[in-house]
Amino acid sequence: MKLPDFTDQIADYLQQQEIPDAIEAAIILGSGLGGFADEIKNPQAIPYGNIPGMPVSSVKGHAGELIFGTVSGKNIMAFSGRFHHYEGFSFEQAATPVYIAKSLGANKLIVSNAAGGINTSFSVGDLMVIEGIIRNNLAISPRGNTKHRYLHHQWVDEVRQLAANLGLVTQQGTYIFSTGPNYETKSEIRAFRKMGADAVGMSTAPELFEAARLELKSVAISLISNMAAGVTGEKLDHDEVKAAADSRKEDFAKLVKELVAKL
Ligand code: 6GU
């Protein structure tokens, strides 16, 4: 299956490093969820900046790194730091972690993000298992349409069951992709709710689109870090996102470890 040319250079470099040869799962860590890296045993971190061909983040100090290691006894790779379209990356560049995962033979993908809650029954700090995506102007790839499902519905149920077994209550819903960089207006959020969206964010859709095309089995989880515009009377602020992520990071880590172990 065709990967963008820039992927070859990245994969070649990574193959030259001493990385495990059978990688079971790739994990993309969302905003505020990078602390999951501490859960990785025998971590081998490679800064994105060291990887030839890797897109370079414009935001200094947030360059990110790719970490190889084990979680629940299985070889995984985790991307701490992703490529958002609103930072100036193409949708294809935004899907870079997926191409790398595919070229290194991982066939499972766990994607996470921080998202704004649209569903009025959600609360800040909720974990939402994504069951559907509204792409909202996402024009990713000249490589054709995917014939494959974005998310395996069976997995959504399984993920929620595994979470429940750990004593974690989860939500389930549709994620709508917003190009950003600005947060939405109240009117947009009202419209998104009518379209059937439960949460909104600026990532994840490019990655899931390409993961489906490349036939990776994907699970995606949103941490509701704040409610979207107009849902409560409160203003959106970045510190809130961080505080919500901090308050759920242990539960998030427990859940991801369980998913790596059991899926
Ligand atoms: Cl309210 N909107 C978008 N686009 N992304 C978000 C968000 C809202 N909250 C967290 N991430």
Image (cartoon, rainbow, N blue to C red):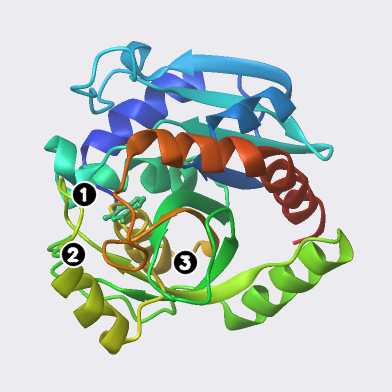
Q: Is residue 68 left or right of residue 63?
A: right
Looking at the rendered image, the quarter that the N terminus falls into is: bottom left
Pointer 2 local density, CA inside 10 Å: few below 14, some 14–19, many at least 20: few
Distance (Cα) linking label 2 and label 3: 14 Å
Circles 3 and 1, Cβ within 8 Å, touching? The answer is no
Q: Is mark 1 within 8 Å of ligand 1?
A: no
Kind of residue sitting beneath label 3: Glu
Looking at the rendered image, the quarter that the C terminus falls into is: bottom right
Residue ID for mark 3: 215
| Residue in the picture at 31% in, 69% down | 176
Question: Camera-side residue: 208 or 117?
Answer: 117
Kind of residue sitting beneath label 1: Glu
Residue ID for mark 2: 143
Distance (Cα) linking label 3 and label 1: 16 Å
Q: Earlier in the sequence, mark 3 or mark 1?
A: 1
Label drawn at residue 211: none
Pointer 1 local density, CA inside 10 Å: few below 14, some 14–19, many at least 20: many
Label drawn at residue 92: 1
Disc count in the image? Answer: 3
